[in-house]
Image (cartoon, rainbow, N blue to C red):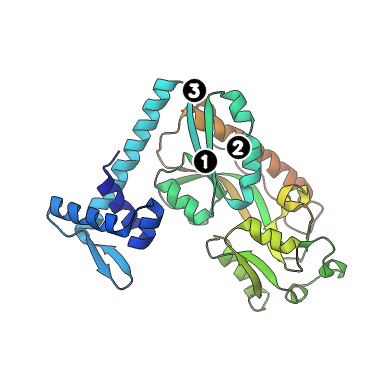
Amino acid sequence: MLDPDLRYLIHIARFRSMARAADELAVSQSTLSRAVQRLESRFGVGLVDRTSHGVCLTDPGKRLVARLADADRQLRDAENELNDIAQGRKGVVRIAAGHTVSSPVVRALVPRLRIDRPAANLQLDTCFNKRLMMRLIDGDYDFGVSLIPAELPPELVAYPLLRDRLVPVVRQGHPITSIANPKVDDLMQFLWAGADSHILSNAALDALFLRAKVGRPDYAVQCSSYEAAIDAVKSSDCIAFAPDWQVHQGLGLGAGLTIVEVPGFAHPRTLGILERRGAYISPLGRRAQELVTEALELLNARAAKLSAHTSGPTPRSAPRPPPAWASGS
């Protein structure tokens, strides 16, 4: 692994802020400042400029960080590969899942992965898609399960598995459920709940209101988690967006919710597995991918059947991942 000073510089470059980098690393800002001073003395050039808006890298700093980040990822891959060779099927698989898809991912892996690989351990984090992709690129996870953006970062490769729709949802018994054939104007009569700006789908959801020629809704509740936003909907007359399959299943977060079907007022999405291009993934990681793939393809098939009974578009079958997954290559 890289020495601490070099790893600190990578985090400073990522966050462009001493304070945010220090919070992420759980160290003091003075620790980071001393690390930068040691590196600048070591290499004989300035690496970081401090501005009123934070910090930025000098040109030599940018060149150094680009090489360091690539070297750090390769070292992590090499360490993981050697650990797999030494431990056989033992090891840890590190997975990140987007908030709306975390529940089926958990059900796919627990307890089945442990049954298949008794010595295996699972690290599963739930986070917003933007942060998920950033940390996946940095090598913090073996793979992620999330929304696939229209413009995928070049460092990542995606395997589509599930097509769904984000639709307006309310609690059961909400006043709007008594309206036959509700319109967008009916939705605008109520307050809304939603997650904050970290949501990749926010721009597409805002575009729905723009196309309907209504103003942006009044968000009475904005949460740092999807779960909190749905809880707010269940305990009030607020409206929020949620995946249609989650409500149709009526399990977990989808329990107690009702879809407000408004023709043309839904955001279609594609979700699937993301992994870093060219990264080493252990046999344990590949097995976890197989289990997630199986669960999401089954969910996609069920969603396609359910959509035949709604006014929304029928999800197309998502393409399967390449055969290399099955071989573990």
Q: Secondary structure at mark 2?
A: helix
Could you classify mark 1 by the number of other residues whose Cα lies within 10 Å: few (under 14), some (14-19), or many (20 or more)? many
Task: Tell me if 226 is positioned left or right of 154 in this view.
Answer: right
Q: Secondary structure at mark 3?
A: loop
The span from disc 2 to disc 3 (Cα, nearest Å) is 19 Å
As drawn, the label of residue 95 is 1
Quarter of the N terminus within the rendering: top left
Mark 2 touches mark 1? (CB < 8 Å): yes
Of callouts 2 and 1, the N-terminal one: 1
Residue designated by label 3: 89
Name the amino acid, label 1: Ile
Q: Secondary structure at mark 1?
A: strand
As drawn, the label of residue 292 is 2
Image coordinates for residue 111, horizontal then vertical, percent: 64, 31
Name the amino acid, label 3: Arg
**Residue drawn at (47%, 39%), measured in percent from left and top?**
142
Image coordinates for residue 292, horizontal then vertical, percent: 60, 37
Name the amino acid, label 2: Val
Could you classify mark 3 by the number of other residues whose Cα lies within 10 Å: few (under 14), some (14-19), or many (20 or more)? some
Of callouts 2 and 3, the N-terminal one: 3
Image coordinates for residue 45, horizontal then vertical, percent: 14, 57
The span from disc 1 to disc 3 (Cα, nearest Å) is 17 Å
**Residue drawn at (28%, 51%), measured in percent from left and top?**
66
